[in-house]
Amino acid sequence: MDNSKDYVLNIRVSKDTLNKLKNKAKENSQSLSDLVRKTLDDSWEIFGDLKEDLFGKDEKSANGVDYYQKVIVAKDVNCEKCGSPISKASEAYLGITKVGAKKYFCNSCFINS
């Protein structure tokens, strides 16, 4: 993913919420987009800090992975860590993150992580 691009996020809100956001943006002399963007950024940071304060730093998951499973891949993939190709029908390790994202790791990177 190219991190230099901005992306558009369309959301549906009530008329009351829209009016509150517009009024707050006007109070702060900023655009509605800037207000929403800053609010989202600040919220992620605050919730991340709060989670760390309550539950401690999450060091148990390497590479953002909650668990691994040894698999035989059904298609050609690349190792998430070293980028080396893992060919179809080869053994690999599938890592699943909290949000359900799948990451494939070659045997060497899995053993050394």
Image (cartoon, rainbow, N blue to C red):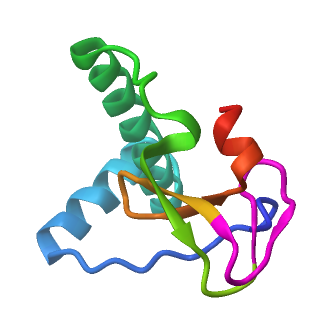
| Corner quadrant of residue 2 | bottom right
In which quadrant will I find the C terminus? top right
Front one among 17 and 24: 17
Front one among 75 and 61: 75
In which quadrant will I find the N terminus? bottom right
How many numbered discs? 0
- Tell whether 99 sits left or right of 84: left
Residue 25 point in image, percent of width and height? 40, 52
Residue 34 point in image, percent of width and height? 53, 54
Q: Is residue 78 a member of the stretch shown in magenta? A: yes
Residue 7 point in image, percent of width and height? 63, 73
Residue 44 vertical position relative to residue 81 in the rendered view, above or below: above
Residue at horizontal 77 percent and vertical 59 percent from the top:
3
- Tell whether 82 sits left or right of 19: right
The rendered magenta stretch, by its main secondary structure, is classed as: loop
Residue at horizontal 40 percent and vertical 24 percent from the top:
58
Residue 91 vertical position relative to residue 45 in the rendered view, above or below: below
Residue at horizontal 83 percent and vertical 50 percent from the top:
82
Residue 14 vertical position relative to residue 50 in the rendered view, above or below: below
Residue 33 vertical position relative to residue 9 in the rendered view, above or below: above
Residue 32 point in image, percent of width and height? 45, 61
- Tell whether 22 sits left or right of 87: left
| Corner quadrant of residue 96 | bottom left
Residue at horizontal 33 percent and vertical 61 percent from the top:
22
| Corner quadrant of residue 45 | top left
Q: Is residue 50 a member of the stretch shown in magenta? A: no
- Which segment is the magenta one? 77-91
